[in-house]
Amino acid sequence: MTGLQPTSVLLITPLFPPMMGGAETVVLNQAKQLARQHIRVTVLTARIPSTIDKELVEGVLVRRPPRIAVGSLSGVTFHLTTFASFLAHILLNTRIHYDVVHCHMIHYPVLAGIILKLLRPKTVLVATSHGSDLNTCTKPALFRGIVRGLLRWIDHLIVVSDDLLRIAGQLGVPSQKRTRIPNGVSAQFFSVQSERNVQYDVLFFGGIKHQKGLQDLIAAAAILRDGGNPIRVAIAGRGPELGRLMKMASEYRLTTVEFLNAVSQDEIRRLLTVSQVVVFPSVSEGMPCALLEAMAAGKPVVATAVGGIRDVISHNSDGMIVPPNNPRKLAEAILELLHDSQLRDKLSSGARNKAAMHYRWECLVNPLLQVYSKARD
């Protein structure tokens, strides 16, 4: 396949829809775009409740081999049993050849890809770092050594931000073997239109976890309330920090902060139509798909200067950037936007135009195919 488009690609990912998160959204859309290029695409992912072993999703074959179903979908047991199921599937299907094996997340999906490459030495091994792997798993010395070892086997590494590109270099990946390809946004978000009946001043949507910095959003809401500017906040999503954040909002006596169990794309698009401003107060990021979705929907965004957010937003042109871990600065930016309709309109237009020009999934399949070809060369 030197210099040519691959005919078959295997994507290995811990989770896949119906589980929806940033990485899952990326894999789904990459798979769909590759299939539209007449490539035989297979996704190997974890078996979770209500899913089946084998199904066809928009031209993509999805394989979920049997797994011992114990523990949560984020604990060590889940990852161990999922890796075991990947390994069993690979060993039982050694006759199937893929031109490219593309692993998402630099941990056990890559280990599974290495095993497949050992069985099929001509297979091209590509991996994508979404951020949480290289950002957090490389801090303990032991984990850093393991990640370095995994990266040595990879023919080419894709990262979603300039920050991760730098980290990959520090981990020993040569410049010619690493490429930044940003995340993208689905076309349906460009059709979102704001309603006159605004229900929320501020919306956050995404995973409810520590790296999202939602404690700062709650603290900012308290600062604004205490200053005589109460705001209506919707926090939409699921995750391990939900209980702690609900307790925090209760302790602040914030009666206008709502926690919504809204995770489907339809639910998020509806919330975008009835919200004035979208906030992403992250303390660590790869490149949040939710940010791109909000921009495509034409919503004015306030986000922190971390990870791939800095690659996407130009301050006061298509969004507002504030420092992380700073609820007061976050509160000031939110209040400025809520009080300035002209600024909201300016950022809304800039955000939608930038998302349309640079971040449509259709625009990102060619860079991916170029990486596949380069890795084979």
Image (cartoon, grey):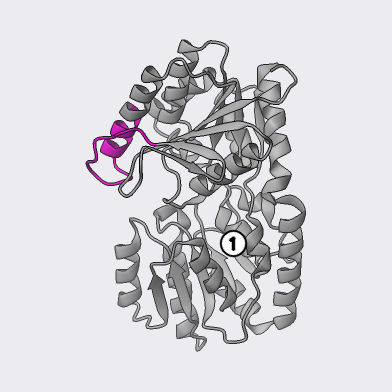
Magenta-drawn stretch, dominant element (helix, strand or loop): loop
Q: Residue furthest left?
A: 70
Residue that appears at 51% across and 33% down:
42
Residue 182 percent location from the top left of the image: 65, 44
Q: Is residue 49 above or below residue 181?
A: below
Question: How many numbered callouts?
Answer: 1
Q: Residue visible at 76% across and 65% down?
A: 350
Question: Residue furthest toward the bottom?
Answer: 228
The residue labelled by disc 1 is 303
Residue located 43% across and 66% down the image: 262
Q: Is residue 33 visible?
A: yes
Q: Does 112 sit left or right of 305 as displayed?
A: left
Rendered position, 270 above or below 321: below
Which residue occupies the foreground of this view, 92 or 321?
Answer: 92
Label 1 crowd (10 A; few <14 / some 14-19 / many >=20): many
Query: On the rendered structure, is 105 left or right of 294?
Result: left
Within the magenta stretch, is there residue 71?
Answer: yes
| Highlighted magenta segment, given as a residue range | 64-83
Tell me which residue sits at (69%, 57%) in the image.
Answer: 313
Q: Secondary structure at mark 1?
A: strand
Q: At label 1, which amino acid type do we have?
A: Ala
145 over 362 or under it: above or below? above
Q: Quadrant of residue 279?
A: bottom right
Q: Is residue 320 visible?
A: no
The quarter holding residue 352 reads bottom right
Position of the C terminus, as image quadrant, is top right
Q: Position of residue 328 (x, y in %)?
A: 52, 71
Q: Quadrant of the N terminus?
A: top right
